[in-house]
Each structure stands twice: as structure tokens, then as C-alpha cells.
Amino acid sequence: MKKLGSLSFTVFICLFLIMLLIVSTTMESKYGTDMAQKVFYQSKWFDCVLALLWLNIFCSTVLRFPFKKKHIGFLITHASILALLIGALMSRTWGVEGQMLLFEGDTRKAIANRGYFLDVVFPNGTKVEWPLMKAQEVLPVDTLGAEIKVGRIFDFAKEEEVVLDQPGAVTENRAIQVTLKSDLMNLEEQFWLVEDHPFNPHGNFKTIGPASFYLKKGTAEKLVEKPTLEISNSGGSSLSIEITENMEDSIALMDLGLTIENIQYFKHAVVSGRELMEGPQGSGYNPAVKFHVVDQDGNRHQVIRFALFPDFESMHGDSISGTSKVTYVFNAPGADLGINADGSTLTFYYWPGDVWSFKAVTKDGHFQEGEIRKGDTKELEWADFNIHIDDMLKSASVTTRIVRDDKGKKGPFAVEIVVQSNEQTFSQWVVESQKVGFHAKEGDYKFMLKSNAHELPFALTLNEFRKIDYPGTTNPASFESDVTLRDLESEKDIQQTIKMNQPMDYKGYRIFQMSYIQNDQRGEGSVFTIAKKPGITLIYLSSFAIFFGAFCQFYLKKEE
């Protein structure tokens, strides 16, 4: 007992714990909480280290017997540390902790504890459930001579797109990979734009903050350089008028006996009340023209045309004969590039002969263009943004693969299954809660990955998920979830918003907003950690008692 309660053993065990916690914290920040829990905090050897610490404190306390008044602070402090460790053991032994993934509209009443089972259904209908222990493990089943082996295991997985060129393909499918960088916004994002994406109908379009990116086929149409009003009639006559900011002259409208007067150009048009006017500084690019059409009798009506919204037509005023035969089309720089009034636009064009070009338009209508090649870097007129051309493909094919999510550490659990049957080898990734299968000569194999589940006394529904990004990036500044908690016994509903640092408490359970998932098929989802710690009250009381004991120790010593 003297050795266990000695000061030298105390120093040794404390230094060892300090070094251990430094290593575990570093590993947790690099590889995630699950990895740290598995290797350190939930391991048997870590339990032994804490048990040695408890024995050291207990023995050092007993060795002070018989106790005197000066030992009161010492006793309170040491007894409180022992109680704190007991409280931690209670939470470890009888506590509950797990994760729950909910997409918007989903409801669940169970959490996933650590540990997974693999369900296998063989071609003859035989079903086997096997706990996953480690990679490269061969499952001890022998059905139809098949061997099933566990390949790679990813605690956090994500589905990654793979875009490859097919030089011998019959049909073309253009694709471009670029990297957008900005030191000012601390942004570096690489992405693909694919003309005909098999999994995403909008694969040729992407938004990052207020900026929009397009991939389009180049046309021989001349780029609009100046605002122009194109006028034509049913007889085939046409007239093109270059629009400037101050136009005072009246213009005769072909042979219809009509004239155009009071032509006004608005580069950043806004509607205030019932009037069209130039928007304030900082308004989005929205070119428009307003003018009056006057006949020989002096009747007049007003016409408004928007370059970005050609389907919008506005005419007000007297009825004038002959105007139904006239068509007005307003064109302005940037309108043919897909620019919108909300932000900047960058469009990539492909042309015959493997020629590529780009056209970038800022929010206020300034644009730049030029030819691009693989490896080029173009400085954009958007703050300090630049775009690097990583790859350009003529006949792209798009597939997916499962990779480890080391960066986000928020993806689902996934395992690679390798099946060898009748001299055939199949490899298939199985993602948590998803059924997969493949066809072999002897029939179909089916796999499903399930986590250990713990039933809760309540059901949780995700009503809405919200994510707020840092301006100009896709990096989250905060995220939160609107949920409805239903008590399964009383059927009472509670609605609350769970935020990153504002968990929800209910009947001893604490619900944390841990992370989120954005899925093209399912939409947005939240990952919650739900925990119940029976020893948490004892831990809090012990922490307060440790402070009180330390106070008594120094106060009583000073008094003596």
C-alpha cells in the first residue's frame, strides 16, 4: 500500500496521464472522436490507468490515518476526486451515448451505438448476421462454397465523383475541372462541370456564394458589346438602335407612321412604386430600356424591356393601331452570358476543334473573355479571385467511389466486402443503413450494414435544418436544427431549436447538434449526439467539493 500511495507513484501516474491526453487529443483532432474513443478512452488499458490513479489516491488517503484537523481539506479533496472517478465509471458503465442521423422530415426513436453488424443473405435464402471486428477478417460462413472477407473499413465515408475521359466514345460529353482560389476569402475549391451528368441534371452549373459557374456549347453569335434595341415588324423590316444614357432625338419607326421618343436607359434598373428608375450604388446589374411610341394623332404609350428578362413585357397608355405588328427586343452586354442581378457569373464555352474559352461578368456588368487551355490560371475581376484550369475532357464518363472522409469526419460508416465464389471475385462497398447486392453465377447476394441500436423513450423529428456560411465561401459559420420531440409514453410534443452550443435536455438525455450532411438525393440532414450520463450529478458535486477542499486545505493551514 505504501508504494501505491507514495508521492513518486503519484508523480509518475500524473505525468503518464498528461502525456497520454496530449497524444489522444492530437489524434482526435486529426482522425476524429470515434478513433480516439476506440483507441484510447474506451479501451481496457485506459480503464487500468484510471484504476491505478484511483488506487493511488485511495492509498495515499488511508496512509494519513489517524486523521487530524489539518487533514480536513486533504480528506475532502481526495475523497471528492475518488467520487468524481466513481461518477465517471457510473456514466461509462450504465450511461448511453450514440448518434442519430435525420434528414428533413425523418423521425427516429433509437440511436446508433458504436459497433456494427453485417447482414448477409445468400442466394439460397440463408441469412447470417455477423459483428464486424476488424479489416481483412474472413467471416466464418460456408454457404455454396463462397468466402466473404471484410476489406477496408471507414469510420467516416463519403461518395466521391470520378470523372474520366473516354477517347473512343461515340458521343461527346464535355467536362471541365477548375479550382477557384481567393486568399482574401481563404477559399480554395475544386469542382467539375459536366455537360451531361448522369446523376445530376444540373451538373453543368454550380454556385459558390454569390458567384455562378456554367458550362455551355459555344455558338457563332456575336457577343453583345453595347445596349441595343432591335425592332422588327410582320412585314420583315427591322431597325437596330444603339441605346445610350441620354437620347433626345425622336426616331421614325420604319413605314408604320410611328415614332419613338423619350428613350431612357437604366443599367441597374429597379422598380419603385410604379416607376422604373436607376438603382442605388451597389445594385445588381439589370439593364432595361423605357420609351414612348407615338402615332400620327399624338396618341402615345409606354414600353419597357429588360435584357435579363426578355419574356417580361410592359406597355401602358393609349391604344395605337399598328403596334401589334411591331416586336421590341432589348439586348445588353452580359445578358447573353447568363448573368443575373444577384452576383458574378463565369461561363466556360467549348468549340469545335477542342477549343475552349471563358467569359466572366461581374455584378455591375463588367466582363472579360479569352481562350483557355489546360493548366492556365486566369485572374478574375472579382476581388482577388483567380481560376485554374485543371482538366478539360471531350468525352467524359462519371462514376462514384467510396473514400475516407478525413476532412469533414461526418460521413456514414462504410465497409468493403469481398466475395470469392466459384473462382469469381466481387468487391462491393456497403454503407450504413443502405442495402446493396450483386449478381453471381449461383444467384444474388444481399448485404446490409446495421449499427447497434438503443431504443429511446422519445422520438425525434427533424423539421428544418439551417446552415449559415461565411460570406463568399461554403464553410459553415453555424448550423442549427428545428426539431419536434415526442414522449412515447405521454405523447407530449416539444418543439425546440438545437444549435451548435445550445443542446436540448429531456429526462436525463442531452441532445447535441454535432454535424450535418448534404446529400443530392435526400437533401439536408443533421447528425445528433444523444447522451445520458447517470454519474453526471456526482461528477458536478465532486468538482465543487474539490474546490472547497482545496480552499479548506490552504485556509486551515494558514490559521494554524
Image (cartoon, helix red, strand yellow):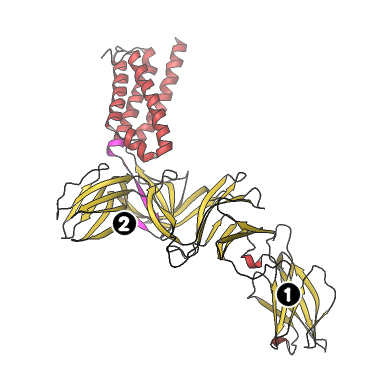
Residue 295 percent coordinates (x, y): 80, 87
Give the residues in magenta.
Answer: 91-107
Residue in the foreground of this view, choosing between 368 and 320: 368
Residue pictured at 35% horizontal, 43% vertical: 531
Q: Secondary structure at mark 1?
A: strand
Residue 73 at x, y = what percent? 39, 18
Task: Tell me which amino acid carries mark 1.
Answer: Leu
Residue 229, numbered label: 1
Label 2 – label 1 distance at C-alpha: 57 Å
Residue situated furthest top in the rendering: 560
In the displayed structure image, the side of residue 281 where residue 75 appears, left or right: left
Left or right of residue 183, residue 365 in this image:
right
Query: Image quadrant for the N terminus?
Result: top left
Q: Residue 272 lies in what quarter of the image?
A: bottom right
Vertical comparison of 97 with 232: above or below: above
Instruction: Check if residue 398 falls in the magenta segment.
Output: no
- Residue in view at x 36 percent, y 32 percent: 539
Residue position for label 2: 434
Q: Amino acid at mark 2?
A: Gln
Percent from the top left, x then y, of residue 190?
A: 52, 51
Q: Is residue 347 visible?
A: no
Q: How would you rate the neighbour count of disc 2 (Cα within 10 Å): few for under 14, some for 14-19, many for 20 or more?
A: few
Mark sitting earlier along the chain (2/1): 1
Label 1: how many Cα within 10 Å (few below 14, some 14–19, many 20+): some
Location of the C terminus (image quadrant): top left
State whether residue 16 is above or below residue 7: below
Q: Which mark is residue 277?
A: none
Left or right side of 89 for 237? right
Q: Residue at x 46, y 16 (%)?
A: 555
* Residue 101 shown in magenta: yes
